[in-house]
């Protein structure tokens, strides 16, 4: 019986160790035709691999009206640390002026396929209006690796038809 | 013996019998308000017209099928024999009842179902009442939704279009809604994908279903892509598609008696409550909170606010007393039709047939092939949202012969004009309008003509795409421009007047997508050689405030020190008069001319007679003392200057005209 050469075994093991954390695909959502209205600002997220467990992220937010405050935040369970981040908040951003947030996200290798949701939120104070209008937020997602199936419940087959079971609760 | 054998055979088989399974399915909804977002109130609503299967729980084979009624109740006869573990499943589909096919599924294509407890070893000859069963919220991560709420939205939409007012036939294809999707809700053909945080956002769901019905019953030319409120310079085809879908969401919510149906709201569904859950909202009645920045044919907010004004009425349950707009949604259309039915007829008729569909096609379609009437009220509604589908104040000026006068000068942008003209009744369509503007230019002067959006709005506020043509006094084309101004606006610069005379600019459009629109136009003249340019410092003089307006005459160095005379008139600049020696003067003499000539340097007409400065300039002043009566309000005072040879021997040059309007 031939043994697996040590360097081959090491490469395999190394690959196994690294693979879950390596972003195999990075996707930024692009709204197709017929989408719901966005808040009144342009929002773009770019992401690129920055190592086996890191993603370099840049979010650009361009308010269409003068904004009192612009803030970018993350909803990202897979991110264990953030390095090299620029300030995530700015005040007094003029209409058409881009606000950029850059950061390098270090990822939990167990979370392959997790989504990083990038939020942009802002408060507007349009000219001619005494009171500010409400904040608005938008999400863009960066998919790290293969996204997990988002099926909220067990799947059963009824008469040969696939259905997601939502067990009902007796009311009375 | 034979009879006994048959009896034994029956005894050997399980008895086949009919029994009835009944019960009710409900689902957990989440209430929301315009100001409060999700309120925390979570009523149990009936699962209406959903498919119900009675299944054998041991192998999920189907024993019988039926559907819930409008109250969520069902009663299904089952043929069976012996015993079985019986379970009832209500699916997030409405296919069995017929006529309003809707399916809610995961993004993987699996439908949802909610299930009763299993009733083991149920005697299939005994009726089974499963009671009232409540489909709880469904979670995707922290986000909540309910497929039965989305099913209800799909059904509400089809009930609206198939109802007696609209009378649409059942759709040929199934309306499919998928949840949970990603971070944005969108629609492609007949499939809606709802964002993970939109599972309870009724207005978002109905907006997306509106896209589906646009696809099924009409025809959209929207190029798609990101869009937003408070944006008046989107692609007008996108803005109609999105605006109509949002309007549709409100119309559906109004149709089933939703309190305060006239708004759009996109909110977070992570379970939190209060105003902080609101991500995006806008009222249809007044555009709040984007009321100050909503308007124009390419603003989706203006589209849905105007369409809402058409169908709403004083009885609409909203926080606004009365109808709040010039169009009463209860107006009789004739032939038993309703306003909403007329809107639908336009939508499935001329709107469906229009190439490059925009709100302008909806406007045209209201009047032809069927005239649904009330043109003045409809025009007022649209104008309220800065969609000006009406002749402007200087129409008709569709030819050089009918050109309107315009005063050259840096501060003389015209009032808002429209590329719209119809002399018909009803006044539509208004396509093909050409607006001509006439102005006097002394030979040698340079000419610049430019258009801009109303008020120089950097966000356009119109979908107008104006083009310009410049004509000589003989009607020859001197220059033309499609662009050169800000954004889509046109600008002609560098043209030179070969001789004294009335030149003209034509504003029109070459755009098939933007047939109408609003614009302002301005003419600038440049002083060259001996061409005298007379410019008013302001376009108006106020009766109540009094004051003065300076008239600057610049005639060139070559005319240094020459005598000049400023003439005045209240009768306009065309066709003008002929001065001694044959020079054309852009002013129609009248009593004001005589008055000014009699006292050329008196208090009202100061500096109207004198000698040019060493550099060939001067400033005359027209002064309006306080207390002048209101009878002069509206008068247009026209001024033109004559530059004479030394000793007033002859008229050497005639200036351009300047006009000042007397205002309250």
Image (spheres, grey):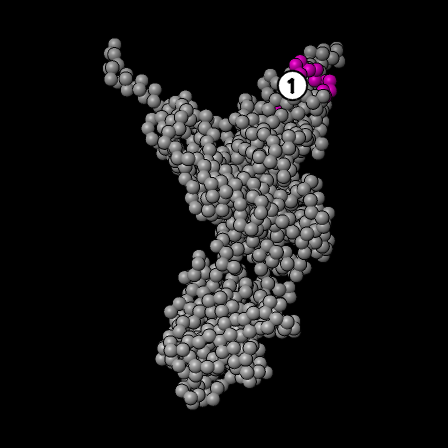
* Magenta residue check for B120: yes
Q: Residue at x 49, y 76 (%)?
A: B620
Where does residue A73 sit, x and y in percent of width and height? 46, 33
Mark 1: few/some/many CA within 10 Å (<14, 14-19, 20+): some
Quarter of the image that includes the C terminus of chain B: bottom right
Return the residue nearer the eye: B599 or B377.
B599
Mark 1 — residue? B117
Q: Is residue A35 left or right of residue B530?
A: right
Query: Circle 1 marks a residue in which chain?
Result: B
On screen, A154 above or below B185? above
Q: Is residue A4 left or right of residue B287?
A: left
Tell me the element at label 1. loop
Q: Quadrant of residue B654?
A: bottom left
* Magenta residue check for A32: no
Query: Is residue B432 visible from the viewing direction of this image?
Result: no
Where does residue B381 sit, x and y in percent of width and height? 63, 56
The range drawn in magenta is B111-129
Q: Residue at x 50, y 56 (%)?
A: B457
């Amino acid at each position: 019986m031939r043994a697996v050469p040590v360097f081959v075994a090491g490469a395999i093991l190394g690959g196994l160790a690294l693979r879950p954390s390596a972003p195999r695909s990075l996707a930024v959502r692009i709204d197709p035709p017929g989408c719901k209205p966005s808040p009144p600002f342009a929002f773009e997220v770019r992401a690129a691999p920055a190592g086996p467990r890191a993603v370099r992220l840049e979010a650009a937010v361009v308010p269409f009206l003068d904004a009192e405050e612009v803030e970018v935040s993350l909803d990202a369970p897979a991110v264990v640390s953030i390095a090299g981040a620029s300030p995530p908040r700015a005040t007094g951003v003029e209409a058409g002026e881009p606000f950029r947030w850059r950061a390098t996200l270090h990822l939990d290798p167990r979370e392959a396929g997790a989504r990083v949701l990038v939020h942009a939120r802002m408060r507007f104070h349009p000219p001619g209006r005494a009171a500010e209008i409400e904040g608005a937020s938008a999400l863009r997602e960066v998919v790290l690796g293969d996204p997990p199936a988002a099926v909220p419940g067990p799947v059963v087959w009824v008469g040969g038809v696939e259905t997601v079971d939502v067990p009902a609760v007796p009311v009375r | 013996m034979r009879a006994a054998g048959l009896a034994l055979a029956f005894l050997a088989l399980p008895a086949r019998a009919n029994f009835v399974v009944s019960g009710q399915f409900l689902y957990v909804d989440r209430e929301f308000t315009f100001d409060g977002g999700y309120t925390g109130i979570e009523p149990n609503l009936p699962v209406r017209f959903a498919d119900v299967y009675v299944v054998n729980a041991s192998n999920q084979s189907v024993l019988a099928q039926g559907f819930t009624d409008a109250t969520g109740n069902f009663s299904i006869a089952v043929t069976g024999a012996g015993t079985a573990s019986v379970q009832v499943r209500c699916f997030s589909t409405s296919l069995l009842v017929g006529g309003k096919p809707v399916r809610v599924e995961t993004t993987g294509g699996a439908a949802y179902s909610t299930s009763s407890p299993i009733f083991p070893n149920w005697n299939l000859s005994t009726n089974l009442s499963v009671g009232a069963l409540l489909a709880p919220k469904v979670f995707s991560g922290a986000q909540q939704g309910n497929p039965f709420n989305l099913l209800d939205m799909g059904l509400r939409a089809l009930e609206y279009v198939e109802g007696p007012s609209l009378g649409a036939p059942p759709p040929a294809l199934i309306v499919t809604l998928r949840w949970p999707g990603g971070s944005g809700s969108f629609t492609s053909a007949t499939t809606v994908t709802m964002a993970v945080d939109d599972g309870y956002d009724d207005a978002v769901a109905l907006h997306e279903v509106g896209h589906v019905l646009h696809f099924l019953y009409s025809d959209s030319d929207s190029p798609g892509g990101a869009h937003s409120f408070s944006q008046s310079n989107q692609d007008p085809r996108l803005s109609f598609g999105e605006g109509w879908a949002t309007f549709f969401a409100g119309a559906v919510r109004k149709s089933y008696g939703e309190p305060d149906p006239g708004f759009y709201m996109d909110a977070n569904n992570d379970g939190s409550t209060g105003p902080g859950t609101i991500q995006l909202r806008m009222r249809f009645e007044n555009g709040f909170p984007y009321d100050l920045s909503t308007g124009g044919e390419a603003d989706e907010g203006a589209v849905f606010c105007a369409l809402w004004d058409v169908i709403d009425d004083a009885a609409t349950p909203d926080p606004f007393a009365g109808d709040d707009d010039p169009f009463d949604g209860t107006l009789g259309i004739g032939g038993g039709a309703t306003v909403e039915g007329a809107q639908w007829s336009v939508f499935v008729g001329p709107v469906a047939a229009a190439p490059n569909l925009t709100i302008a096609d909806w406007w045209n379609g209201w009047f032809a092939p069927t005239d649904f009437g009330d043109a003045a009220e409809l025009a007022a509604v649209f104008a309220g949202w800065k969609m000006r589908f009406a002749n402007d104040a200087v129409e008709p000026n569709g030819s050089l012969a009918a050109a309107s006068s315009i005063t050259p000068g840096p501060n003389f942008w015209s009032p808002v004009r429209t590329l719209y003209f119809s002399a018909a009744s009803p006044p539509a369509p208004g396509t093909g309008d050409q607006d001509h503007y006439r102005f006097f230019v002394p030979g040698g002067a340079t000419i610049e003509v430019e258009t801009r959006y109303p008020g120089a709005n950097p966000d356009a506020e119109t979908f107008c795409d104006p083009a310009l043509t410049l004509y000589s006094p003989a009607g020859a084309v001197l220059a033309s421009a499609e662009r050169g101004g800000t954004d889509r606006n046109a600008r002609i610069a560098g043209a030179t007047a070969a001789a004294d005379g009335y030149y003209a600019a034509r504003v029109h459009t070459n755009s098939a997508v933007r047939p109408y629109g609003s614009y302002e136009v301005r003419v600038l003249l440049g002083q060259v050689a001996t061409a005298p340019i007379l410019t008013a410092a302001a376009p108006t003089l106020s009766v109540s405030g009094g004051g003065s307006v300076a008239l600057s005459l610049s005639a060139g160095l070559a005319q240094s020190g020459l005598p000049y005379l400023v003439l005045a008139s209240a009768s306009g600049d065309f066709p003008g008069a002929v001065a001694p020696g044959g020079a054309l003067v852009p002013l129609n003499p009248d009593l004001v001319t005589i008055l000014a000539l009699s006292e050329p340097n008196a208090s009202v007409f100061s500096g109207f007679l004198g000698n040019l400065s060493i550099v060939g300039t001067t400033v005359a002043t027209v002064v309006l003392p306080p207390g002048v009566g209101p009878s002069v309000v509206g008068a247009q005072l026209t001024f033109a200057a004559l530059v004479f040879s030394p000793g007033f021997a002859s008229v050497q040059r005639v200036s351009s005209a300047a006009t000042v309007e007397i205002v309250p």
